[in-house]
Image (cartoon, rainbow, N blue to C red):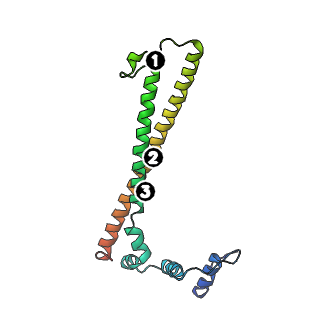
């Protein structure tokens, strides 16, 4: 069974069914209905697309830039934590030049040595997780940056093809 409207006259009714399925909802705000109608209207060309408010809003908003900055701040913070974890691990292993003279490792009995080994393992796991988090965040930021570049390139191409900048 096909749910598509049989004619253009039935299209608003079909859209109304989509938006008002299930339990009765409050009517959509007028500006939302106008935006839906504007977005559903067929495009007449690039200049028509650029004249639509939702297209301009999408091309001009800075949400991706905000996401990129938020990701950068998260990366900076995590990198600081990562450096602290690395330093702590170096201290535990006796590899830190600033604390090597303290002889933290010498004089452990078997039980203390086992606890120290468990602590070293936990710190190594934390460092590994931090490294993985940094890697994933860096990849995510790279993808967001790429999306920003693509959006700006698309905007320039549309404006060039449409005959100039739109408001």
Front position among marks 1 and 2: 1
Q: Is residue 11 visible?
A: yes
Between marks 3 and 1, how big is the CA–CA gap? 44 Å
Query: Alpha-carbon distance for marks 3 and 2?
Result: 11 Å
Pointers 3 and 2 in contact (C-beta within 8 Å): no
Return the disc, 1 or 2, that comes first in the chain's sequence: 1
Checking the image for residue 104, the label placed there is 1
| Percent position of residue 71, x then y | 42, 51
The residue shown at (42%, 44%) is 77
**Is residue 6 something that shows in the picture?**
no
Name the residue tied to disc 2. 137
User: Relative to 125, is 155 above or below?
Assistant: below
Which mark is drawn over residue 17? none
The answer to which quarter of the image holds residue 75 is top left
The N terminus lies in quadrant: bottom right
Residue indicated by mark 3: 67
Q: Residue at x 37, y 68 (%)?
A: 60
Q: Furthest-bottom residue in view? A: 9
Q: Tell me residue 83's x, y (percent).
A: 41, 34
Indicate which disc, 3 or 2, sits on the residue closer to the N terminus.
3
- Left or right: 2 with respect to 58? right
């Amino acid at each position: 069974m096909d749910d598509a409207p049989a004619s253009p006259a039935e299209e608003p009714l079909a859209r109304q069914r989509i938006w008002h399925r299930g339990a009765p909802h409050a009517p959509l705000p007028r500006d939302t209905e106008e935006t839906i109608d504007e977005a559903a209207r067929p495009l007449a060309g690039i200049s028509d697309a650029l004249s639509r408010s939702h297209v301009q809003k999408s091309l001009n908003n800075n949400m991706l830039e905000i996401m990129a900055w938020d990701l950068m701040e998260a990366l900076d913070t995590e990198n600081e934590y990562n450096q602290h974890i690395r330093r702590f691990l170096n201290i535990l292993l006796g590899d830190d030049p600033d604390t090597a003279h303290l002889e933290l490792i010498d004089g452990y009995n078997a039980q203390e040595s086992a606890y120290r080994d468990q602590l070293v393992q936990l710190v190594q796991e934390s460092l590994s997780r931090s490294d993985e988090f940094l890697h994933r965040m860096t990849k995510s930021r790279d993808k967001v940056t790429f999306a920003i570049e693509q959006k700006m390139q698309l905007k320039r191409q549309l404006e060039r093809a449409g005959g100039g900048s739109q408001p």
